[in-house]
Amino acid sequence: MGKEFFFTNNMTLKLEYVINQYDTLEDFEKDFPPEFLNDDKHIGNYLNELLQKYKKKASAVSEDAMLATSYVGNIIKGRKCNPSRNALISICLAIGTELEEVQYLLKYGGQAPLYVRRKRDVVIWFGFMKKKTLDEVDEDLKKRNYRPLVKE
């Protein structure tokens, strides 16, 4: 992944602080043009970077994530702009991403990142930490009576 990606994500924390200094959205928009903020296609760009980093094909990841063969490709092409939280987590498990990468993907997709105070999320968190497969994470979820990532 390029330096730009990590730089812009590092800047997110600063931007969260800065936005709180503005009284109106109009004032914020004057100082931060639309080009500065990500659009809905950013998730596809980041997902494509992950595929390249891990040397994976979109169709293979879709299948490994138990999704339609074209699902990941449609996100990358901007045809699918609102994937579900479970789908994004499943995609990251299928790719084999690091925990930090799934957190970014969830945020870019407009979904809540994994949260260590939610029991179900802790099971998923450990799945990423221990490099478990999607099937293994779903088994851990079911064993604890939580909803699996993949619909049955």
Image (tube, grey):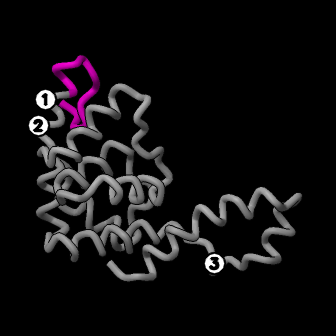
Percent position of residue 24, x then y: 87, 60
Residue flagged by tag 2: what amino acid is it?
Glu
Give the amino acid type for the residue marked by disc 3 in the picture.
Phe
Q: Which residues are magenta?
A: 141-152
- Does residue 129 appear left or right of residue 31 in this picture? left
Residue 94, percent from left and from top = 16, 54
Crowd around label 3: few <14 · some 14–19 · many ≥20 (10 Å)? few
Q: Name the residue that disc number 3 marks.
A: 36
As measured in the structure, the alpha-carbon distance from the residue carrying label 2 to the one carrying label 1 is: 5 Å
Report the Cα–Cα distance between label 1 and label 3: 42 Å
Q: Quadrant of the C terminus?
A: top left
Kindly identify the residue that appears in the image at 17 percent across and 33 percent down. 138
Query: Camera-side residue: 78 or 26?
Result: 26
What percent of the width, then of the height, locates residue 61?
16, 60
- Magenta region includes residue 18: no
Q: Check disc 2 and report the residue beneath it.
A: 136
The verdict on residue 148 being magenta is yes
Q: Are marks 2 and 1 in contact (CB under 8 Å)?
A: yes
**Foreground pick, 92 / 101:** 101
Q: Secondary structure at mark 3?
A: helix
Q: Earlier in the sequence, mark 3 or mark 2?
A: 3
Q: Quadrant of residue 1?
A: bottom left
Residue 63 in the figure: left or right of residue 1: left
Indicate the secondary structure of the residue bearing disc 1: helix
Distance between the alpha carbons at the discs numbered 3 and 2:
40 Å
Asked whether the beta carbons under mark 3 and mark 2 sit within 8 Å of each other, the answer is no
Give the labeled residue for mark 1.
139
